[in-house]
Image (tube, helix red, strand yellow):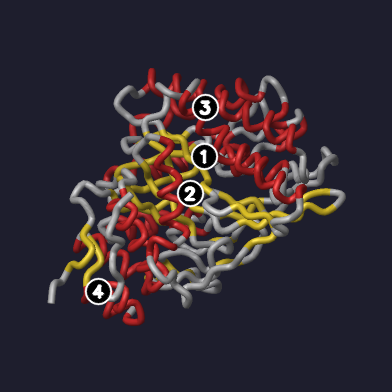
Amino acid sequence: MPQVIYRFPPSFYWGIVVRSFRVWGPAPQAAKTDRIREAPVWAWQGEGWRQAVRSAAQMNLQVLGLYLSWPRLQPSPDTWDRTWLDRYRDILSYARELGLEVWLAFHDGEDPAWFHEREGWLHRESPRWFADYVTRVARELAPWVTAGWCPLPEPNRVAWEGYITGERPPGFRARWPQALVALGHMMEAHARVAAALRRLAPRVPVFLSLAIYPALQPARRWHPADRRAVAQARHLLLQTPARSLAGPLHSQVDKVGVVPMPLQVLRVHRPGLILQRASSSSSSPPAHPRQGTLFQVLKGARRLARPLWILHHAGPDVEDTPSPGWLVDQLLQVWHGLIYGAVTQAYLYEGLVDGSDFRGKGTPQGLLEVDRVTRSRRERALARLYWEVIREGGLSHNAVAAYAPERLSHLYPGFPLPKHVE
């Protein structure tokens, strides 16, 4: 019996992405006195971060991705927090000492309070404010960044959740014109920053990270308002960023980071949009990998005409407790995406240790489980399977039999490929 059934290219990168802070909830639309509440990811608390980075290196991960927290680094327009800048520098230099490549993003999904008080991404000067912040921080951290820069991750998701669904600051709902203005300013900020980063480190690739929503459906297929909302969502979430890649960002972006998102069902109800999400479960794998959400994401992302890196979070949007079987399902879809023709170069799992999601719920989603009392850490079965995949360069019979035996039937015939590859 062959040991490695689904083998990935030798040049394929395996890694981990770690966020700095997570937004707990949407800020009120007015109320300048309110601040964004943040929950620190336990990986960076105290001195435990060294153990976390060491664990990543011991798992033979090749890439450590790190999201920086803008509110922490620049709490006011004229104030810089050297403590956090030094902490980030220590993390990156230690990762390089251990042989990890570093991928760095300058935005963690939240903006400083002073930025929101100035109308946030709706202000015409917002691209300049963000570019000034990134340029200053990049000069300090450039010596350790080798795998890539990501100036502004998931701008389409920031616009979607900040101005359409109200899930994150500034908490607006169904503000389509404002969402397009904010997204336009974010893409302009990305272009400014990309040009500066190329001058600073010409050999380090620049990424545009996008949230890809493979399935946007109207709740009522017969209802004109629902159908119009889906058309507007597709324009905002994919068509606008794709046009930017073909236009202003054509020569500024080398690779695309793909963040898979779950099924979205849109229903319009006065006074605004109501978003319904379809849930998924690790106990219910797709009937065929090519019917899975991640494969559909990779299929749709081909039109972006850039090499793809998958940045995959398994939080509440996917399920609360990702299992080894869930990882087998996802990697099978990545493998089929490669066969289909999606130029995928890397898979980075988001979540090194347990943390809180942006709604403030404690969500066990890290490769390392954290005891909430002692803060001790131990590898989950998910981490051990991930290590086996990296070591063997693919999904093997023995690894799946050991960690997800219920998925063995998916590795063998009875699961035929289509006769035709599109």
Mark 2 or mark 4: name the one nearer the start of the chain: 2
**Between residues 389 and 308, which one lies in front from this camera angle?**
308
> Does dot 4 land on a helix, a strand or a loop?
loop
* Contact flag, marks 3 and 2 (Cβ < 8 Å): no
Question: Which tag is nearer the camera, tag 2 or tag 4?
Answer: 4
* Contact flag, marks 3 and 1 (Cβ < 8 Å): no
Q: What residue type is labelled 1?
A: Pro
Question: Measured from the top left, where is residue 210 in percent x and y?
Answer: 50, 41
Question: Which tag is nearer the camera, tag 3 or tag 4?
Answer: 4
Mark 3 or mark 4: name the one nearer the start of the chain: 3
Write the residue at 50% across / 55% down. Answer: 46
**Between residues 394 and 146, which one lies in front from this camera angle?**
394
> Does dot 2 land on a helix, a strand or a loop?
strand
Instruction: Quickly name the residue at label 4.
Output: 413
Mark 3 or mark 1: name the one nearer the start of the chain: 1
Q: Residue 259 carries which label?
A: 2
Instruction: Quickly name the residue at label 1.
Output: 153
Instruction: Quickly name the residue at label 3.
Output: 244
> Does dot 3 land on a helix, a strand or a loop?
helix
Question: Measured from the top left, where is residue 215 in percent x and y?
Answer: 56, 54
Badge 1: residue crowd in 10 Å (few <14, some 14–19, many ≥20): many
**Between residues 247 and 326, which one lies in front from this camera angle?**
247
Write the residue at 82% across / 42% down. Answer: 29
CA gap between label 1 and label 2 equals: 9 Å
* Contact flag, marks 1 and 4 (Cβ < 8 Å): no
CA gap between label 3 and label 1 equals: 15 Å
